[in-house]
């Protein structure tokens, strides 16, 4: 095959909101393969985290990703509490659950809008984003900010939910449920959506399992894998909810999984407000964390997030590791973008296929590999070399505590 | 004021470039375009190509990996061009000041006209930033003509 053309997409591209480079190998109109190049978003957060205290790290953790920020802060707090080994007040668990679910509602609606935009259905994009603002208002009312909440802290939460606000939240949830049901109806019946999404971006069940996909991506391939149900944390053990799965394995399934999950989340918020016990919202925990290792995991809107923290007895972590869901899901992109047998991928389907895993690259870029692009040579740098090259003008540049 | 300047003031087209942001600012920039805030009523439109843009909206700390691409996008924009730094971490690397892979501010890489502070700034603040930029533009033009 001699007439295969490389089509590079990104790092700056109208269909991508984040810097990423996809190279598609195209034969006529068909995509016969794809290669991803990530790393434009690598900032070096994990390393910086070793130079800041656990409390300071909550804020930088929240800024790993602005869409699901609370998830990272929650996970880091969970991992730290795991090392300390103390229970936190039950009310704080419920408030965290409400925060996580509101975040999921906003993230899924955001994604629905972006997906509509990718298939050229800008009307739906505008409608969804208009209705999403309602959720943002509720979040602002509850946590004090629209995007970075700073709600979770080590040992509990920083803000309580008074009765009036809870009632207002319930009212908004009722209205929102109606709207989301309307969108579900629309996605099931609207020809434009069905024609663009049915049978596109297929990820078969075996592939999804073999490639370790997580979150809505694997649930849309018919695998009921959800950390909230499999390893209950926060208040998920006391709140019943359904793990949504669809088994058509295509983009439509991913849209429907996310819409149904939004409806589930609305129910979880309602249930959590109803069952929430009274009491303190925060336990005072020591600043210096004892020697040990801790793990926090939760279900972010995009899948499972794992934080690993190791402490050497000071107030700063010795090592902090983040594994975000998009890194697991990215591996399935080349499979979805490769024509095989009677499964044909057209170049016009590349944006929606890519968007269907809800990629979040700022979460993903946690590691670097030094490669000289011109010669293809790669090497490993020692930490002191990095310090000399890149870190000399940073305020934290001093010996490790 | 010539016709071109008049048109530029009435309908500035913006290009959004994420240089390693946490997405917080990006979703607020997009939120500013959607019905609640709707900057299109001022003629502001998001475009996909640097060659069509008057204003470059940069979000996020500039990472070393993206630096070259950012310069290339900036160079591809036609004159006169303006740059808006949205978010604390774009202006001064903010929460990421201890990270080894970021520049301490966008102005280390390309010249900046307006800074919008906040982490993330609200959509209202971003609109305010654009309006400030337009005022600046008007004054420049007023002095020249
Ligand atoms: S200013 Fe804050 S919200 Fe905006 S990109 Fe930077 S860290 Fe994220």
Image: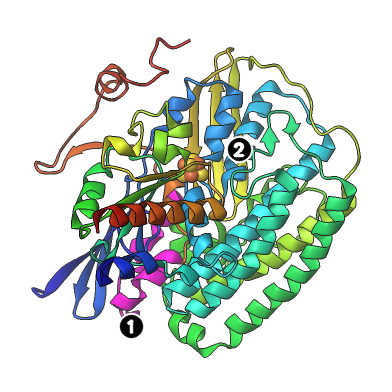
Camera sees residue B137: yes
Q: Position of residue B94 (x, y in %)?
A: 46, 33
Q: Is mark 1 on a helix, strand or loop?
A: loop
Q: Classify residue B46 as left or right of residue B35.
A: left
Q: Classify residue B70 as left or right of residue A226.
A: left
Q: Classify residue A392 as left or right of residue A165.
A: left
Q: Classify residue A66 as left or right of residue A355.
A: right
Query: Closer to the camera: disc 1 or disc 2?
Result: 2
The chain identifier of the residue carrying mark 2 reads: A
Q: Do residues under tags 1 and 2 come within 8 Å of each other at their CB atoms?
A: no
Between A91 and A209, which is closer to the camera in this rendering? A91
Camera sees residue A232: no
Find disc 1 in the rendering and name its residue: A342
Q: Is mark 2 on a helix, strand or loop?
A: helix
Residue at position x 75%, y 75% from top?
A178
Give the dominant element type of the magenta stretch: helix, strand or loop. Answer: helix
Q: How far apart are marks 1 and 2 (CA)?
A: 44 Å
Task: Let me know if residue A341 is in the magenta part.
Answer: yes
The chain identifier of the residue carrying mark 1 reads: A
Q: Where is residue A347 in the image (x, y as percent from the top left)?
A: 29, 75
């Amino acid at each position: 095959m001699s007439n295969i053309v490389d089509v590079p997409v990104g790092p700056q591209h109208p269909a991508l909101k984040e810097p990423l480079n996809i190279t598609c190998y195209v034969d006529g109109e068909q995509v016969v393969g794809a290669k991803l190049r990530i790393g434009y978003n690598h900032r070096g957060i994990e390393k910086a985290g070793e130079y800041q205290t656990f409390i300071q790290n909550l804020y930088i953790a929240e800024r790993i990703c602005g869409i699901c920020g609370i998830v990272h802060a929650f996970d880091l707090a969970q991992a730290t509490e795991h090392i300390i080994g103390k229970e936190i007040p039950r009310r704080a668990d419920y408030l965290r659950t409400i925060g996580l679910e509101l975040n999921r509602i906003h993230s899924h609606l955001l994604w629905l809008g972006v997906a509509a935009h990718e298939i050229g259905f800008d009307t739906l994009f505008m409608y969804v984003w208009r209705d999403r603002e309602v959720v943002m208002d509720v979040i602002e009312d509850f946590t004090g900010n629209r995007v970075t909440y700073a709600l979770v802290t080590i040992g509990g939460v920083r803000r309580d939910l008074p009765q009036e606000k809870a009632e207002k939240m319930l009212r908004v949830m009722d209205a929102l449920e109606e709207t989301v049901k309307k969108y579900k109806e629309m996605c099931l019946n609207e020809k434009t959506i069905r024609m663009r999404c049915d049978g596109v971006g297929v990820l078969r069940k075996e592939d999804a399992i073999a490639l370790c996909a997580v979150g809505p991506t694997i649930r849309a391939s018919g695998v009921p894998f959800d950390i909230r149900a499999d390893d209950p944390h926060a208040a998920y053990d006391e709140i019943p909810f359904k793990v949504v799965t669809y088994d058509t394995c295509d983009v439509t399934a991913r849209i429907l999984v996310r819409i149904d999950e939004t409806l589930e989340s609305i129910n979880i918020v309602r249930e959590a407000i109803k069952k929430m016990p009274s009491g303190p919202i925060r336990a005072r925990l020591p600043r210096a964390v004892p020697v040990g290792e801790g793990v926090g995991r939760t279900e972010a809107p995009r899948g499972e997030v794992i934080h690993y923290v190791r402490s050497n007895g000071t107030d700063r972590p010795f090592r902090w590791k983040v594994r975000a869901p998009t890194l697991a899901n990215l591996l399935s992109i080349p499979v979805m973008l490769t024509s095989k047998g009677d499964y044909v991928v057209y170049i016009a389907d590349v944006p929606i296929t890519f968007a269907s895993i809800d990629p979040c690259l700022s979460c993903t870029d946690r590691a670097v590999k030094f490669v000289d692009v011109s010669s293809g040579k790669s090497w490993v740098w020692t930490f002191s070399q990095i310090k000399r090259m890149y870190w000399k003008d940073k305020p934290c540049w001093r010996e490790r505590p | 004021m010539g016709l071109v300047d008049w048109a530029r003031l009435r309908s500035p087209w913006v290009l959004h470039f994420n240089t390693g942001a946490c997405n917080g600012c990006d979703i607020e920039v997009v939120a500013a375009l959607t019905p609640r805030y709707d900057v299109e009523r001022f003629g502001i439109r998001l475009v996909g190509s640097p060659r069509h843009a008057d204003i470059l909206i940069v979000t996020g700390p500039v990472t070393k990996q993206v630096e070259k691409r950012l310069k290339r996008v900036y160079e591809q924009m036609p004159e006169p061009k303006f740059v808006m730094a949205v978010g604390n971490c774009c202006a001064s690397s903010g929460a990421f000041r201890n990270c080894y892979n970021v520049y301490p501010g966008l102005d280390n890489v390309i010249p900046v006209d307006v800074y919008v502070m906040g982490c993330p700034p609200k959509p209202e603040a971003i609109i305010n930033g654009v309006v400030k930029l337009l005022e600046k533009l008007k004054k420049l033009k007023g002095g020249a003509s």
